[in-house]
Image (spheres, rainbow, N blue to C red):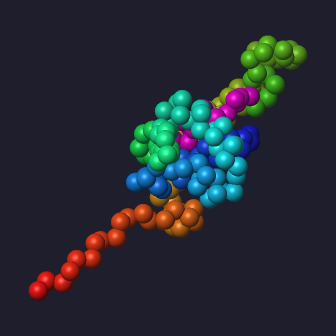
Amino acid sequence: MRLTKQTNYAVRMLMYCAANKEHLSRIPEIAKAYGVSELFLFKILQPLNKAGLVETVRGRNGGVRLGRPAEKITLFDVVKVTEDSFAMAECFEDDGDVDCPLIDSCGLNSALRKALGAFFEVLSGYTIDDLVKARPQINFLLGINDFEPKAAISAPAA
């Protein structure tokens, strides 16, 4: 099974937002960090927003942030929103156009369903937070600056 680019970059976008959690993330910044087009990220943003995985803030100072805490967003949450099909073989497809006489009693079908279930179970065990914490230098790697305001310099006491 191969995940789409959409899923790959959806996870990356969520990781960026999690690493930049104190601030709104902007699509141009995320696109630059990953070397992908802004248009592609905007396309991915829609299903993530609809599923509540991200929130968008409109306006001049707008941007994107996680829709819930990073530790509450599993990889399975992302995959089920971004992948169109989990058909590993023709007999998984719902269109009913299968020319196999073994469709109802095939061992392959059963084995593939079990494998897919195991795949989903593993994805459910990892969160966006896990991925971000696994890379202590993620902010540096993504070019996210620390926007912490510097302490005001006060005049020396007399």
Q: Based on the displayed image, in which of its 4 quarters is residue 102 positioned?
A: top right
Is residue 81 found inside the magenta-colored segment of the image? yes
Q: Position of residue 98 (x, y in %)?
A: 84, 17
| Quadrant location, the N terminus | top right
Q: Nearer the viewer, residue 129 or 112?
A: 129
Q: Is residue 38 above or below residue 82?
A: below
The residue range painted magenta reads 73-87
Q: Based on the displayed image, in which of its 4 quarters is residue 107 positioned?
A: top right
Q: Position of residue 139 (x, y in %)?
A: 51, 63
Q: Is residue 106 above or below residue 117?
A: above
Q: Is residue 45 above or below residue 20?
A: above
Q: Residue at x 27, y 77 (%)?
A: 153
Q: Is residue 105 left or right of residue 151?
A: right
Q: Position of residue 11 (x, y in %)?
A: 59, 46
Q: Residue at x 35, y 66 (%)?
A: 149
| Quadrant location, the C terminus | bottom left
The answer to whether residue 68 is seen in the rendering is yes
The answer to whether residue 72 is seen in the rendering is no
Q: Based on the displayed image, in which of its 4 quarters is residue 67 positioned?
A: top left
Q: Residue at x 47, y 55 (%)?
A: 20
Q: Is residue 75 left or right of residue 103?
A: left
Number of labels in the image equals: 0
Q: Residue at x 49, y 39 (%)?
A: 58
Q: Nearer the viewer, residue 24 or 2?
A: 24
Residue placed furthest toward the bottom: 158
Is residue 116 found inside the magenta-colored segment of the image? no
Residue placed furthest toward the left: 158
